[in-house]
Each structure stands twice: as C-alpha cells, then as structure tokens.
Amino acid sequence: MSSTIQDLRVKLEDPDARVNDAESRAASALRSRDRVLGLASYVEELHHSAGADLCTCGKKQIACSEYKAMYVMREAIAQWERRNKDRMRRGQAHDLPRDHTLAEPDRAPLWRGPQSLEDEYRQARRS
C-alpha cells in the first residue's frame, strides 16, 4: 500500500508524469472507442436498410432489434469509417479490420486493428 501512495506522491509532484499518465489514459480511451465502433460497424453491415422497410437480415425494420439498436449509431459509425478510410488512403495506420467492406487488401501493412471483425468480436467476448 505504501508503494502505491509513494507512486501517487511522485506523480503529483512530477508534472511530466501526470501528463504522460493523462496521455496514456486518453490513448486507451480512443482505442476502446475504435474497438466499439469497429464491432458496431460489423453489426451495421449485417443489419441495415434493404429498401421497402426491410432490414438486410430479411425482417421488417420495425421488427429487427439489431436494426433499431443501430439506428442511433449509424452516423457515428459512418464518421468513424470515413475517418479510417481516409487514414488508409493517406498511407497512415487505421483501425478498419481486414475483412471490413471498406478495407483495401493492398493496404494490409497499415492495419493496427484486429485481423477480422470476428476476431475482434471473440476477443471482446473474452474480456
């Protein structure tokens, strides 16, 4: 316990340590956000409008729980996908999984995210 208190004292006295700690927490939060939006984009691929009030799963949109749940997230997912697609096109690291519909196979070395949406889903279920 005393080492924890000592660590806290050092962090409080050292502004660089506080900044580094804050940057680390911010980076972790951004990675978490990207994982959530990546998984949400997978659900969106499976449950979106197929026209005539139908979901792509075959149910009526009003009867599809996944379609209704994704309704409020569609704009956030679209922005995340555009941002990562732009990063990929500029040759920067991005978080689109390899099997995402917007991913370009010839840009494989740039992936910093999961290998596939299914891998990401399995990993999220374990944690």
Image: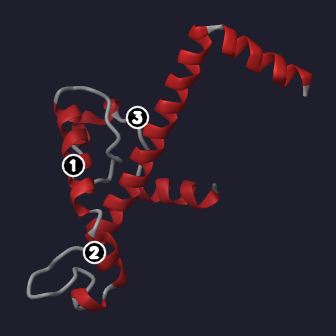
- Residue at image position (28%, 67%) is 72
Amino acid type shown at disc 3: Arg
Q: Quadrant of residue 78?
A: bottom left
Q: Residue furthest right?
A: 2
User: Which residue, given by chain and number where applicable, does mark 3 sit on?
Assistant: 112
Identify the secondary structure beneath mark 1. Answer: helix
Q: CA distance from mark 3 to mark 1?
A: 18 Å
User: Which residue, given by chain and number where applicable, does mark 2 sit on?
Assistant: 47
* Side of 17 where 49 appears, left or right: left
Amino acid type shown at disc 2: His
Identify the secondary structure beneath mark 3. Answer: loop
Image quadrant where one finds the N terminus: top right
Residue 108, labelled with which disc?
none
Q: Quadrant of residue 117?
A: bottom left
Q: Is residue 7 above or below residue 125?
A: above
- Residue at image position (36%, 35%) is 111
- Residue at image position (35%, 47%) is 97
Identify the secondary structure beneath mark 2. Answer: loop
Q: Earlier in the sequence, mark 3 or mark 1?
A: 1
* Crowd tier of the residue under label 1, counting other residues whose Cα lies within 10 Å: few below 14, some 14–19, many 20 or above: few
* Crowd tier of the residue under label 2, counting other residues whose Cα lies within 10 Å: few below 14, some 14–19, many 20 or above: many
Image quadrant where one finds the C terminus: bottom right
Q: Is residue 121 above or below residue 16?
A: below
Circles 2 and 3 in contact, beta carbons < 8 Å: no
* Side of 80 where 114 appears, left or right: right
3 vs 1, front mark: 1
